[in-house]
């Protein structure tokens, strides 16, 4: 069925699936951080994902650590991944899930701009307007300068910039690396991010049954999300596929309400609707690619 769709449509579907899995991962990580330090949770999560992708790479008969991982673009990808994961993990632990996810929705704007600068993609005025409207929707949720804005959300902003750099580097990564090898690299630096947070905080806590269960859930969701995201960024145009990262906000809003009893106000819901509609408009304006 997917083969009958255009490259842009398939990339969008992969992105939506990845965002749903990432939202579940965020929920489980935030829940685990209630019992153990966030650095410890991130390190365990990274180690588990690393083992899974290493097993997948071996099952495919490929090298676990490809020599191309030492290339400049992959080194940049790793550094961006460390920044994104580390700062966003702090945002999840210290701020509401819905708020952190909302700030993350600025990523497509940064990635789309990077696609124009680095990949010479053509973005028409209507697509730029749709992306701009989506960013306005994010501002409706954040309301910077007002009482509703949380200064700790700077961690989510730094994480967003890290993820944008990672996504652009994924697009430019050598074709010799498959999704499993990229997953190994990604979860290896995630483990490093957790260890850095542990070193800074100096905290290690005993594992509870609840924390263990949530860590297992983060690993399952993280592996699925990572694989889908890699496929999404390698399918279709970056400026068309990446706006569907906005769907993560909807999943996060639902999980925030149901699991953490967050209560987003009408402005937050209205901003979410604007973001989603702008993403749908971008897809409607896309042309099938070969």
Image: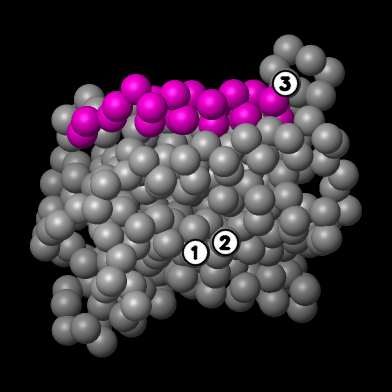
**Residue identifier under label 2:** 20
Q: What stretch is highlighted in magenta?
A: 121-141
Quarter of the view holding residue 156: top right
Quarter of the view holding residue 24: bottom right
Disc 3 to disc 1, C-alpha distance:
28 Å
Tag 1 or tag 3, which sits nearer the N-term? 1
Disc 2 to disc 3, C-alpha distance:
25 Å
Above or below, comparing residue 112 to residue 230 in the picture: above
Q: Could you tell me residue 121's position as x and y percent?
A: 20, 33
Q: Could you tell me residue 263's position as x and y percent?
A: 87, 44
Observer-nearest of 34 and 21: 21
Left or right of 28 on screen, residue 191: left
**Residue identifier under label 1:** 17
Mark 2 vs 1: CB contact within 8 A: yes
Under tag 1, what secondary structure? helix
**Residue identifier under label 3:** 143
Disc 2 to disc 1, C-alpha distance:
5 Å
Observer-nearest of 150 and 264: 264
Above or below, comparing residue 131 to residue 214 in the picture: above
Query: Residue at horizontal 17%, vertical 62%?
Result: 177
Name the residue furthest top: 145
Query: Residue at horizontal 85%, vertical 36%?
Result: 265
Left or right of 236 on screen, residue 105: right
Under tag 2, what secondary structure? helix
Label 2: few (<14), some (14–19) or many (≥20) C-alpha neighbours in 10 Å: many
């Amino acid at each position: 069925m997917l083969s009958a769709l255009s490259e842009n449509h398939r990339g969008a579907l992969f992105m939506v699936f990845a965002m749903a899995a990432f939202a579940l991962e965020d929920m489980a990580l935030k829940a685990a951080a209630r019992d153990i330090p966030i650095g410890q949770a991130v390190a365990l999560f990274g180690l588990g994902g690393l083992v899974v992708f290493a097993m997948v790479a071996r099952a495919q008969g490929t090298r676990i650590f490809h020599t191309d991982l030492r290339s400049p673009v992959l080194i940049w990808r790793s550094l961006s991944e460390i920044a994104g994961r580390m700062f966003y993990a702090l945002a999840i632990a210290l701020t509401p899930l819905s708020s952190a996810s909302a700030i993350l929705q600025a990523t497509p704007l940064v990635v789309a701009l990077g696609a124009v600068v680095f990949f010479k993609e053509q973005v028409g005025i209507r697509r730029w307007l749709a992306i701009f409207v989506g960013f306005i929707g994010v501002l409706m949720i954040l309301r910077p300068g007002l009482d509703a804005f949380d200064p700790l959300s700077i961690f989510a902003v730094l994480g967003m910039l890290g993820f944008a750099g990672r996504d652009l580097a994924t697009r430019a990564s050598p074709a010799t690396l498959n999704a499993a090898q990229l997953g190994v690299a990604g979860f290896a630096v995630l483990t490093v991010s957790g260890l850095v947070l542990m070193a800074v905080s100096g905290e290690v806590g005993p594992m509870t049954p609840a924390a263990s269960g949530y860590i297992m859930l983060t690993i399952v969701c993280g592996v699925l999300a990572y694989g889908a995201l890699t496929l999404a960024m390698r399918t279709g145009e970056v400026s068309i596929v990446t706006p569907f990262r906005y769907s993560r906000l909807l999943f996060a809003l639902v999980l925030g309400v149901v699991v953490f009893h967050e209560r987003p106000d009408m402005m937050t819901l209205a901003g979410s609707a604007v973001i989603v509609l702008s993403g749908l408009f971008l897809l409607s304006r896309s042309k099938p690619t070969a």
